Image (tube, rainbow, N blue to C red):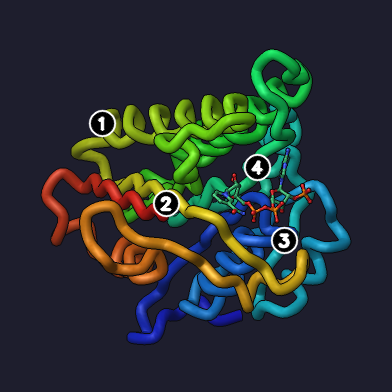
Amino acid sequence: MSSKGREGTMLGTAVVTGASSGIGAATARGLAAAGFEVVLGARRLDRLEAVAAELSGARALPLDVTDASSVESFCGQVPSCRVLVNNAGGALGLEPVAEADEEKWREMWESNVLGTFRMTRGLLGKLIASGNGLVVNVCSVAAFEPYPGGAGYNAAKAAERALTDVLRMELLGRPVRVTEIDPGMVRRTSPWSASGATRLVRRRSTRASSRSALRTSLTASPSSRPGRATSTSTSS
Ligand SMILES: NC(=O)c1ccc[n+]([C@@H]2O[C@H](COP(=O)([O-])OP(=O)(O)OC[C@H]3O[C@@H](n4cnc5c(N)ncnc54)[C@H](OP(=O)(O)O)[C@@H]3O)[C@@H](O)[C@H]2O)c1
């Protein structure tokens, strides 16, 4: 297993939640290619193992971010962590508020908000101990662009965004940066492979791509970042 980056530096362990498909699988591939030892988590272990099998030294571990004991068990199997990508989650349903299903709202809150909270709390000590940690929360343009039928997802992603902002403030002066990625619509060539994903993204303040924003975050050293906290919002 290679844990060295392109410049030969040791990059450490990156955890990606929701890595069995879509953005999470693509992120795991990207981090492995960059030289991280990747630990992939999701509920569908067969898909997770298929993604991990493509990547040198990657590990697939069962994870349900809506289940506190599953999160605890997962985090206990990760000895060290430099990067945590909170990606697990998604949108459920398009019903207007008047007809919305409470169970779908609860599920979206559990995975997108509480899942991100549980994973971050579970690995924060290891991220700090790494001396150069990074939390990447995959939020959404839906966090700040509401749409009819989207209230449950809009609310959950807005809450995840608030959690991200607070975490960034709370970690000022500690060696962990907090980055938010806000994708717009993401098109995939297949539910398994996001290597052909077309990301229609634009940064709110600049035109840099989310990929280059993430790369910049990953390669920055703590000493080059006063306050050691970074906000990277990428949206379309
Ligand atoms: N696709 C878009 O257009 C878009 C746009 C903006 C933001 N996003 C965000 O991007 C993230 C990834 O979405 P995607 O489009 O790549 O969707 P996806 O292909 O459906 O992937 C979702 C991933 O999350 C995992 N997951 C769901 N619930 C989980 C749970 N309780 N515990 C652990 N893993 C869980 C799924 O794995 P298992 O089912 O195997 O557990 C899967 O790997 C989500 O947070 C989503 O809100 C997506």
Q: Is 159 situated left or right of 74 in this image?
A: left
Q: Is 178 situated left or right of 20 in this image?
A: left
Compute the Cα span from label 2 to label 3.
17 Å
**Residue named by callout 4:** 90
Q: Tag 2 or tag 4, which sits nearer the N-term?
A: 4
- Rendered location of residue 6, percent (x, y): 39, 86
**Residue named by callout 1:** 169
| Residue at position x 67%, y 23% in the image | 96
Question: Can residue 72 be seen at all in this image of the molecule?
Answer: no
- Rendered location of residue 62, percent (x, y): 78, 49
Q: Is mark 4 within 8 Å of ligand 1?
A: yes
60, above or below 179, in the image? below
Which mark is nearer the camera, 4 or 3? 4
Labels 1 and 2 touching (C-beta < 8 A): no
Q: Tag 4 or tag 1, which sits nearer the N-term?
A: 4
**Residue named by callout 3:** 21
Q: Amino acid at mark 2?
A: Ile
Q: Amino acid at mark 3?
A: Ser
Indicate which disc residue 213 carries: none
Q: Amino acid at mark 1?
A: Met
Labels 2 and 3 touching (C-beta < 8 A): no
Q: Tag 4, which secondary structure? A: loop
Compute the Cα span from label 1 to label 4.
25 Å
**Residue named by callout 2:** 181
How many residues crowd around disc 2 within 10 Å: few (fewer than 14), some, or many (20 or more)?
many
Q: Nearer the viewer, residue 235 or 67?
A: 235
Q: Tag 3 or tag 1, which sits nearer the N-term?
A: 3
The quarter of the displayed image where residue 50 is located: bottom right
Q: Tag 3 or tag 4, which sits nearer the N-term?
A: 3
